[in-house]
Structure formats: structure tokens, C-alpha cells
Amino acid sequence: MSTPILRVALDAPLLPGWFDYRLPAGIDAAAVAPGTRVLVPWGRRTVIGIVVGSATESALPLAKLKPVIAVLDDVPVLPASWLALGQFAAQYYQRPLGEVLLPALPTLLRRASGYKQAEPNGPWRSASIKGLLKRLTQTASNPPGADASAAPALNVEQAEAVEALARQSGFQTFLLHGVTGSGKTEVYLHAVAAVLARGQQALILVPEINLTPQLLHVFQQRFPDIVIASLHSHLADGERALAWLQAQTGQARIVLGTRLAIFTPVPQLGLIVVDEEHDPSFKQQEGLRYSARDLAVYRAHQENIPVVLGSATPSLESWLQVERGKYRRLALTQRAVAAANLPAIRMIDMQRHKANHGLTEPVLGALKQTLERGEQALVFLNRRGYAPVLSCTSCGWVSSCKACSAFMVWHKLDGRLRCHHCSAEHAVPRHCPACGNVDLAPLGRGTQRIEEHLQTLFPQARISRVDRDSTRRKHSVQELLAQAHAGEIDILVGTQMLAKGHDFQRLSLVAVVNPDTALFSQDYRAAERLFAQLMQVAGRAGRAATAGQVLLQTRYPQHPLYQALTTHDYAKFAQQLLQERQQAGWPPYAHQAVLRAEAATLEAALNFLQQAQAALNDLPGILVYDSVPMRMARLAGQERAQLLFESTSRPALQQALTQANTWLHAQKTRVRWSLEVDPQEI
Ligand code: ADP
Ligand code: ZN
Ligand code: ZN
């Protein structure tokens, strides 16, 4: 019997995300493998879709179905495991399948416009893909590189971790819990070496784009003869597609990248590593709101291979899984470099030590000594710009954004006020827009202001600021970091961009300027994030033989979070937090999803959510909270509100969400809505 209908996933916001097309007589749809790309008509356009199946009949009569224009055979068919991952993500995150699969492809592989037919009935080809395939065969024979960099002898804990990983070939989630500087990378390198020796491929995820080159370099040094594909969002289209094809064809034995790399087809996958697994950047915040960490665990399960989640401050989700015996913890409790110790962390009580220009006497004293010893210091605060607010000394006017419920930040260097939430910016007013007073003053401090002040205090010191403003230019982060590594910078002033992963050899002092606000956030995850961030940034100090110290300016030196930090006691802190979460019935003890609505007025947004709530009123096992304005209710001129779903049962939540999703897709409304499963910020 002939199967004339192809099911094709398309990037379109309609459930279920695939559409039926007809194949010309003589071609059997069942012979076109799922994972094949096809050119099809979509409205008045021609688009690329991905075959997900075939059928003998459709909801429409066969004659009404549009015909497939071409079956593309220029690159290998996407593997079944890749389709299965996409199918899982679509179902779990409640997105149309095509809106998951197509955006996961590199642009070149999903852009129909490049395709032409050289002769009638000839194959459809794209010049840019042809070029890529040529480069692909060239890179296949990688010239032998330098000698593999010498691996240090593993310490006992590292050796145990490596051995536990080597013994595991089937599915198991490992939590590599290692203090900062404990040599987690070395464990990854050994585990990857074992995977390569078995003829398999490894996939390594890192949280930050700025860390990719650094880790790539480490892996290249250790495995000079191996092709490593690196994938992140700053690649040019051609580079991205090349890396993708290298992974898919198996030429690249190691695939290294940021969260989007989780969707790379890796046919002989033997191991997945997620470094800094607690990091919020593994969660995509728009479109398909997925967690690459969670998908990594799913993918490992699906492919029956081990996955390693590494962190000094694991997420409470992962920590609880260890307590429940589902994940296996591998512990590295010491710094790997023999002479390096964890830094001493000291609270500077700001009730006793008044700050001058944001910095207290003990911090200034320590900076001075550090400079005298020729060592490096890092001054950390999570606020870029000069001052978070500009205010009028006479009438109390403050610089707020017209489009958001937020202040405009003063950027003194270029004399602008900028909203860090929308794209609004304008010149600093010469006088108060409300009363005409010319005396406008900054309130609070950002990185620029601290940098300016430090430069007047220490005119000889080489001071550099690392934040999103100072690194806007391409490669400028890498340049700044290279200078810091080379010891050409005495004081680094920066935001969390500096907190992760870097191994500055001469850095002996870390000063943390203003962390207290997060202690009192309405977001119950704020404490978890703050602890991780402070532990990370503290971990930059004293990584080599130079002893390190961390000074933290706070009004609450006795706060349990800071106390746990001082003793480097993640386990104790996690236990406290988990107890709180359990009592409150919050994640990880419950599962959440949030429906967000955006409209011109708050009323319209809330109204829409109330309709949703009414339509979904008796979902078994689900707690639906009342709809409320979002914490930042106004963003870029839109009013935003949300409706929270919660359940202790994941299947119950999934079922409810499927119902909600069907209802949502059936609505004709001007309200923009989005559904997020496992939201990180509510
Ligand atoms: P982490 O990622 O756990 O913070 P890293 O992997 O960056 O730590 O390692 C910290 C430092 O320790 C690096 O300079 C690394 O080369 C070094 N190192 C790792 N393992 C060993 C070892 N067994 N002996 C000596 N040095 C080591
Ligand atoms: Zn005024
Ligand atoms: Zn704004």
C-alpha cells in the first residue's frame, strides 16, 4: 500500500507543529526517513521543514494537500535520537514541535532562500552549504598538533572521581561537587579521554560564552589531534553550521558549547558534561524556555550514557537528587594545587566601618597592601554604569524609565541615561525635568563610579573594568581577560562576568562591595543565587601559591548565608535552604509553571489570565495561584502579569499544562502570552 503523505515539522506557532504534505506519485513517503529536510510551500513562501513521519491519510483530502517541492539530500539526515530529544523538549516545555526543531538548526540549514535548482528535475542545492561540505572534508584530516599537554598527577579524590566515571558506561547522573579550584576540569579531561578511547564523542556544556575559548584551549592542548567543534551564539552562520556538521558526521569527537549546544546531533555520544550546572544561564529565557542542564540529563538517559554535572555550589534541584539517591555525588574537597588554600572570607561590618565612596577603610587598606606586594585585586559589584539613579537634590525627582518599572542608570563616561531592561536611552538632562534645578546628583554606585574613585586613590595602579559596557566590542572581553592573566592589570573592577571560571594566578584579594540587597528579595531563589555567586567570586582568590583573602562589605555580617560562606560550608547552607523550601512547599519539592501575559494595560493582561484560570478551574492535583502583576510589571511599554501553577506531581502538572496549552492556542487575543515550565524567576 502506498503512503503518499509526509508529516513535516515547520517553524510555526500552531499545535502540534507539523503539517501534512503530499508527495508526487511514484515516491513513497515511508521511504523518506524522518529527519530529512524538505522544501515545502507555506502560505506564499517556500520554507524548509523537517520530516517527522509519514501517513496514509490526513484530516484533509489528499488532493487538497500541497505537494512537497523537494526532498533535500545535501547534508546527512538528522538522527532519530536528535528528533526524539526535540520531541521530548516540545512536549515537556509545551511548544509546537516545529518551533523546537527548526530553531535548533543552524540558520544555513533552515534557510530556504539559498536553494536553487541548476536544471529542471535536478537536485536542489545551496552554494553556501556546498562550500561548507568542502571545508568539512578538509578538516577531516587534522594535522597532528603539538604534544599533548602534560596532565598533572591526579590527587586521591580526583582519581576516585575519574575511576567512578570510567566504570560507568550506562546512564547515571553524577554530581561532581568540587570546591573552587579543586580541579574539576582535570576530571572532565580524564573522563573525556576514556570516552575518546572507546571511539565515542563527548558533549561539554559551559554556562558562559566567555568561558568557551578558555576551555576550548585547555581541551585542544590536551587532545591536539582531535577535532573539537565549538558552538555558541556569537558564531557566524557558516561557522555554526560547520561545527554542527562536524559533530553530526562524527568528525568532531568533542563538542563544546553554551546551552544551545545541547541540541547538536552527536551520533556516537558517550558522555555529557555540564560545567557549573547551577548557573542560571543554562536556562533559555525566551522562545523555547528550556533548561540545557535538565535536557542534558534527559539526553543521557535516552542514550543510556553517563552525565556529569559539575559545581562548587550545586543547584538545590541536583542536591536533592543526591539526597534521594538518584544522582551520585563525587566530591573534591581540596584545592588541587598543593600550595593553594581556600581563601579566608571576612565580613566587614558597615555599621562599624563607614564607607567612603562605597569603600570601607579595611578594604582600602587591603587594596593598598595588595598593590604594594605586586599582587592583583578584584573589586566585585553587580551593578554596571556610574550610578543606578540620578536624582534632583531639590525636588526629589529620580531618573525612571518611561517604558519600564525601573530606574534609568547614569552612564557618566558617555553622558547617557540608560534603562538596563529595555533599549531606552537619552542624554543626561542639564537640569531637573521637574523643577529646573541644575543640581542633579548620583544615588548609589555602579562599576564606573567605583573605578573612578579607585583611580583617584591609587593613581599609579593599572585599573580595568570588566562589565557589559567595557566589553561591548567583539573580542574585548578576551583581550581584557588576557591582560588580567598576563598580570598587566592591578585592580579588576567588575560584575559577575568576572566571577566564573577564571584562574588568575596572582589574584590575592577579592572585595565584594554591595551584596546585601539580594538577601531581602521577594524571589525565593535569590539567596541560592547570591550564595553561588559569592562562592564563585570568592573562589577567584588564592588559586595559586599566593594566599587569598575575601572581604565582604555588609550591614548583616551575622546573616546565616554569610556565615555559611565564611566556613565554605555549602552542604550546611543547602540543608537550611532545602528545609525552608520543604516547609513552604516550593521547588524542588514542588514543580511549577508560569503563564505570563503582556498587554498595553495591566487590566487586559490580568483579564486574560483570569479567563485562563476560569477555563482551567478544576485541574486535579494542581494549585493555581491568583494572577498577579509581575514583579517588574512594566517592561518596554508593556504591562505584564502572571499566573502560577504548582503541583507535587510532575505528571499531573504536565497533563494540566497540555490542557492549558490547547486552550491558549485556541484563543484569538491581542494579549501576548508565554508558558514557562520550571521557571527560575517568578
Ligand atoms: P575548578 O574548575 O574545580 O575550579 P580547575 O579545574 O580550574 O578548578 O583547576 C584549578 C587549578 O588546579 C588549575 O590551574 C589546574 O591546572 C590545577 N590542577 C588540577 N588538578 C591538579 C592536580 N592533580 N595537581 C596539580 N594541579 C592541578
Ligand atoms: Zn527637581
Ligand atoms: Zn526601560
Image: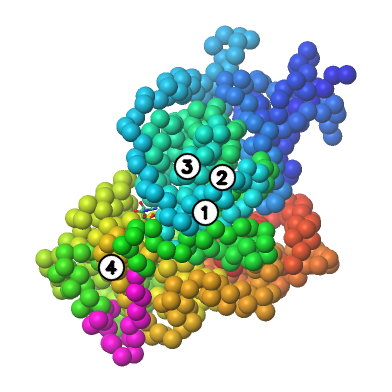
Secondary structure, mark 1, is helix
Occupied quadrant, residue 664: bottom right
Q: Is residue 467 rendered to the left or right of residue 658?
A: left
Q: Earlier in the sequence, mark 2 or mark 4?
A: 2
Q: Earlier in the sequence, mark 2 or mark 1?
A: 1
What label does residue 160 carry, if any?
A: 1
In the displayed structure, would residue 96 be above or below residue 508? above
Secondary structure, mark 4, is loop
Secondary structure, mark 3, is strand
Q: In front here: 136 or 398?
A: 136
Q: Quadrant of the C terminus?
A: bottom right
Q: Is residue 453 rendered to the left or right of residue 395?
A: left
For marks 2 and 3, give the CA distance: 20 Å
Disc 4 residue type? Ala
Tell how many labels: 4
For marks 1 and 3, give the CA distance: 25 Å
Looking at the rendering, the stretch of residues picked out in magenta corresponds to 343-362
For marks 2 and 4, give the CA distance: 34 Å
Disc 3 residue type? Leu
Circle 4/circle 3 CB separation < 8 Å: no
